[in-house]
Amino acid sequence: MNKENCTSLNICVGEIQTPNPKKSQMQKATNPRKILLKKDDVNRLHDERGYFDEIAPRWDDMRRTYFSERVRDRALSEARVQRGKLAADVGVGTGFITEGLIGHGVEVLAIDESLPMLQVLRRKAFGGAGLHCCIGSAERLPVRAGAVDYVFANMCLHHVVHPAAAIGEMARILKKGGTLIITDLDEHAFAFLTEERTDRWMGFRRADVRTWFAEAGLKDIMVGDTGERASVPSDSTDNCADISIFIARGKK
Ligand SMILES: C[S@@+](CC[C@H](N)C(=O)[O-])C[C@H]1O[C@@H](n2cnc3c(N)ncnc32)[C@H](O)[C@@H]1O
């Protein structure tokens, strides 16, 4: 199949080299239509930011069905947040963690790759003087070293390309004595999340997270259970992911 055929069938954008099979083999040959993604699905799969841009207006409703406010309560209490301090919320989305921080009198630097997510956040009632929104990547945070008292990242790590690098960046922007809190998915086997929700990682082993915290120079490391679970249905099958959520804490 040449590139032109592929494109005109709207099945894929790449070039497929099919060898010239003998007739007997041809009967067993794979039907590309069954395994190839449509052009829009390829873009969706490999353009994670496009996915989050698209779902931004619906994220709050989706989030409510995926995991509960108790994840936020656990994250904030583990950090022992104090009024008047400054936190960064990395992969802030529409402000799930940020809302709790502002409610506790903490100023927030809200960082996300997706502008539409930040726009939804900006319009929220709590988005006043104590909220600073900024576009940025978790792996290249647009923040000076030693600038913030806390860093939070809820359900962001399994979307980044290099989780260890992101943790290194989060540690870099912490003040000495500051606290990093990550809440995310434990390792799981629900592969559909990588296709339907653009997850890059099928969760994490807690031992790996501990190692990355230590490599980032953090101390007083704790990686444990939130006692909470994420429940995420498939769009295309009856499958529903049910995954435990870990919490990781480290101090600089
Ligand atoms: C599953 S949502 C979680 C949002 C929010 N933390 C919450 O708990 O509701 C993941 C968010 O991380 C953002 N994100 C994904 N990869 C990122 C990266 N490398 N750097 C910054 N933000 C990222 C997405 O745009 C999205 O808003």
Image: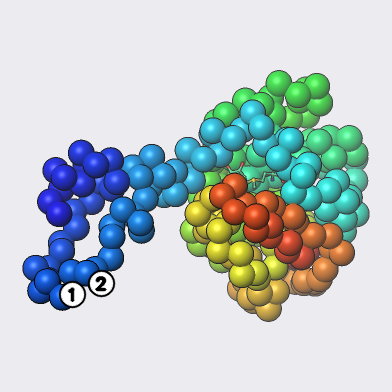
Residue at image position (41%, 44%) is 41
Residue 1, relative to residue 21: is it above or below? above
Q: Closest to the observer: 202 or 171?
A: 202
Indicate which quadrant contains ligand 1.
top right
Q: How many marks?
A: 2
Q: Quadrant of the N terminus?
A: bottom left
Residue at image position (22%, 69%) is 27
Residue 9 x %, y %: 24, 42
**Residue at image mark 2:** 28
Q: CA distance from mark 2 to mark 1?
A: 5 Å
Q: Amino acid at mark 1?
A: Gln
Residue 52 x %, y %: 56, 39
Q: Amino acid at mark 2?
A: Lys
Residue 44 x %, y %: 44, 43
Q: Is residue 114 left or right of residue 24?
A: right
Is residue 86 visible in the rendered image? The answer is no
Badge 1: how crowded within 10 Å, few (<14), some, or many (20+)?
A: few
**2 and 1 marks in contact (CB < 8 Å):** yes
Residue 99, which numbered label? none
Residue 92, relative to residue 189: is it above or below? above
**Residue at image mark 1:** 25
